[in-house]
Amino acid sequence: MVAAVDFSIIRRRALENIRHDLMVAWSGTYPAAQVSTTFEAVLRLHNARATVPDFIPILVEAEMLHLLRSDQLLDDSDRLN
C-alpha cells in the first residue's frame, strides 16, 4: 500500500523557502519585515482566491518578484485587496 502524500506540507515548505530566499536576495534594498509583511498579504490574497492550491507558491513568488522589482512593497498602512 502506498501512503498518501500530504501536499499541504510541501506547499508550506516551498512558501517558507521562497520567503527566506526573497528576504536574503533583497536584504540590501528592503527591510526583512517589509518583505515579510508584503509576502503575508500576497499569500493571504492567493489563498483566498485559489482554485488550485498547488500553484499558490508559484503565484506568490511571481507576484512578490513583480512588487520587489517595481518598488511596490507594502508598508504598515497598505493592504492588498
Image (cartoon, grey):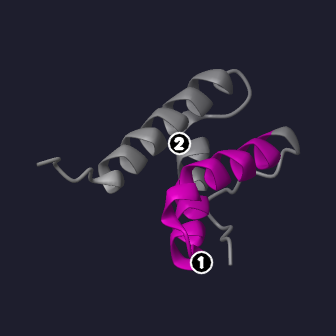
Q: Where is residue 70 in the image (x, y as percent from the top left)?
A: 88, 45
Which quadrant holds residue 30? top right
Pick the residue in front: 80 or 52.
Answer: 52
Q: Is mark 1 on a helix, strand or loop?
A: helix
Q: Where is residue 62 in the image (x, y as percent from the top left)?
A: 73, 47
Mark earlier in primary sequence (2, 1): 2
Q: Quick check: 77 left or right of 10?
A: right
Q: Which residue is drawn at 81% across and 52% down?
A: 72
Q: Name the residue under label 2.
A: 33
Which residue is disc 1 drawn over? 49
Furthest-front residue in view?
A: 1
Q: What stretch is highlighted in magenta?
A: 40-68
Say which of 37 and 63 sits in front. Answer: 63
Q: Which amino acid does label 2 sit on?
A: Ala
Q: Which residue is drawn at 17% across and 47% down?
A: 2
Q: How far apart are marks 2 and 1 (CA)?
A: 24 Å
Note whether 77 is above or below 39 in the view shown.
Answer: below
In the image, is residue 8 above or below residue 61? below
Q: Quadrant location of the C terminus?
A: bottom right
What type is the residue that disc 1 sits on?
Answer: Arg
The residue at 63%/48% (across/down) is: 58
Drawn side of residue 42 relative to residue 9, left or right: right
Lateral position of residue 46 relative to residue 53, left or right: right
Magenta segment includes 50: yes
Q: Residue at x 63, y 53 (%)?
A: 60
60 to the left or right of 71: left
In the foreground, 81 or 18: 18
Q: What element carries label 2?
A: helix
Majority secondary structure of the magenta segment? helix
